[in-house]
Amino acid sequence: MVYQFSFHVSTRGRGSYSISDEVYGCLDESGVETGICVVFVHHTSASLMLCENADPEVRADLERFMARLVPDGDPMFRHVDEGPDDMPAHVRSILTSNSLSLPVAGGCCDLGVWQGIYLWEHRQAPHQRRITVTVYGDCTVVLGSSST
Amino acid sequence: MVYQFSFHVSTRGRGSYSISDEVYGCLDESGVETGICVVFVHHTSASLMLCENADPEVRADLERFMARLVPDGDPMFRHVDEGPDDMPAHVRSILTSNSLSLPVAGGCCDLGVWQGIYLWEHRQAPHQRRITVTVYGDCTVVLGSSST
Amino acid sequence: MVYQFSFHVSTRGRGSYSISDEVYGCLDESGVETGICVVFVHHTSASLMLCENADPEVRADLERFMARLVPDGDPMFRHVDEGPDDMPAHVRSILTSNSLSLPVAGGCCDLGVWQGIYLWEHRQAPHQRRITVTVYGDCTVVLGSSST
């Protein structure tokens, strides 16, 4: 069975935003017990990541690393129509992920204890970002029998 | 239902090549309405990306960025059997993606308006690259009934 | 049909470890003929990669590249609770992949001839890493009939 859901996240500009709860909600609604959950972001200047979810300093360090690796306003870039963070946002997006494929087990997203799901906004300005969650696998079998 | 298709792309050497039409063709042939389309490249010196599809300068900037980050002929590299672009091609491949998982909705690849599908050739010489598209999900139901 | 398997890999610290045989074993057990095999690592300081599998110098060069790009002990990093390789491990993980989506064809993992599946340990100390393999697709049809 395949289930598909879309939702939007309003970002306040560059930074990472937890979407674990939204993804878990889609999974619950699907009723899938065993399978895969694919999270996809429909943009080329934002991305998705599984990141350490306990110390916010990790995501701050990631921002600092990216700011040094792909600096805004780098004179090498010619695609600057939307400003100095335009092309760096595309590069950051290519270096990270536009989809995550997560195992579903026992009706839950089977992530490691430190893995959180984040949308990473790479533009400086606030944006509305669309995300689609596709869940497929074996569904809950009614009457208490096991689904496997 | 699962459908699988393979095709080859003849590259003219380093650079990115649109394969959106080829992937959309596979999806059409599958008849899948709702699901996932996995695009996979069978090589370690080429990769796949979803990239901005309007201004070719974006992909030129990406090339410039990669050429600076992973320069051909870097004396640090020891795997140089096939020339100065051999190891950089492997590194570029690892830093980007060898597969894309794309949502399928309404029988179409549900990409963002600016997202195009590209094969990224990292070797300087022309190569023949093999790509496999696997589509799975709920098929078109005839007679107008809903597919879910 | 969906099949799911988990296994652990005991690493001896930073470096890459072939897990092709373990993944192929899961695939054999599933009996899936045509479909997708998703390999997932449940950690944020280790990752997965498809890498050239013939010359070990390729993976040594990748280590050297990453050591230069994301140096241990970089004073920019503030998340240092577990030592100088703590934050670099998270960055390396984000720049590479936490899952691989591999095509299954003819009951086998349809990889390119030079593609091997590796777990990449980014911490200096030995770790126990959990990996889940989810296989879905059309199963072997008995009595010699075609599965498609």
Image: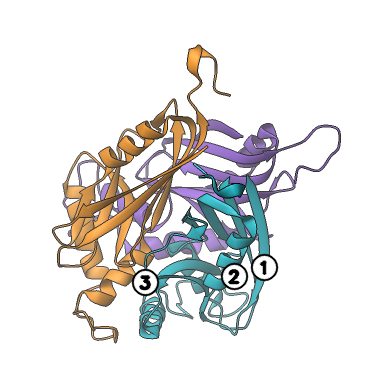
Chain colours: A purple, B orange, C cyan
Residue A105 drawn above or below residue A58 = above
Q: Position of residue A135 (x, y in %)?
A: 59, 39
Badge 3 amino acid: Trp
Residues C112 and C49: in front is C112
**Would you call the spot at circle 2 few (<14 residues within 10 Å), some (14-19), or many (20 or more)?**
some
Q: Nearer the viewer, mark 2 or mark 1?
A: 2
Q: Chain of mark 1?
A: C
**Would you call the spot at circle 1 few (<14 residues within 10 Å), some (14-19), or many (20 or more)?**
few
Residue at image mark 3: C114
How far is the residue under mark 3 from the one under mark 1? 24 Å
Q: Is residue A87 left or right of residue A61?
A: left
Q: Quadrant of residue A94?
A: bottom left
Residue at image mark 2: C22
Residue B109 drawn above or below residue A113 = above
Q: Chain of mark 3?
A: C
Residues A76 and B24: in front is B24
Residue at image mark 1: C7
Asked if disc 2 and disc 1 are in contact, CB closer than 8 Å, the reply is yes
Mark yes or no: residue C50 visible: yes
Residues A40 and B119: in front is B119
How far is the residue under mark 2 from the one under mark 3? 17 Å
